[in-house]
Image (spheres, helix red, strand yellow):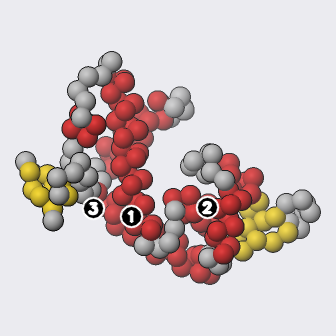
Amino acid sequence: MPILKAGKIYLENTCTYMYICIVKLEQAIQSTKFKNEMHKASLNILYTAWWLKTQMSKVLKEFGLTHEQYNVLRILKGKYPEQLCVKDISCRMIEKSSNVPRIIDRLVIKKLVKRADSPTDKRETVTTLTQAGLAVLAASTESINQLMDEMVKMENKEAEQLNVLLERLRGTEV
């Protein structure tokens, strides 16, 4: 049973809270000591990434997908109807350490993608989306977009500023 405390919704008496809860970093990690503002910002980025991924995982689970599988489907959709080899999918992944061949194996079992021998290189296989994969991707993306609209209350200009700051942090030219 949800409990309302100080304007925030908590689930029972745990630290778990629903996505509609706005919590400062200090409350979330139960720490107020940071080396400096950059240290706090770094932790805030890591915590926020975990938080977003956790919320998205709940939605993707309804479609029988993991984040990595969803990422592969989105990558393939970006090149659809073309086929992509594992190497091309791997270099586009958000999480670079993902085991792309194993992810593709699972998507093949679910009939969301199909694999074939590469017409140009017999050592490679290529992957493409199936109609079922397109349908699952469309439905899951719609649900993810709805979640983001409900969760992230940020004006477009603020999102642009955030993108500039994050790209600067990674050392990318803006």
- Residue at 63% over, 70% down: 107
Circle number at residue 58: 1
- The vertical placement of 1 against 45, above or below, is below
Circle number at residue 168: none
**Cα–Cα span, label 3 and label 2:** 25 Å
Residue that carries the numbered disc 2 in the rendered image: 72
- Residue at 15% over, 62% down: 2
Q: In this view, does 38 lie to the left or right of 97?
A: left
User: Which is more N-terminal, label 1 or label 3?
Assistant: 1
- The vertical placement of 118 against 17, above or below, is below
Q: In which quarter of the image is residue 78?
A: bottom right
Report whether residue 145 is seen. Answer: no
User: Which is more N-terminal, label 1 or label 2?
Assistant: 1
Q: At which x and y percent is residue 131?
A: 62, 81
Which of discs 3 and 2 lies nearer the camera? The answer is: 2
Which of discs 2 and 1 lies nearer the camera? The answer is: 1
User: Which is more N-terminal, label 2 or label 3?
Assistant: 2
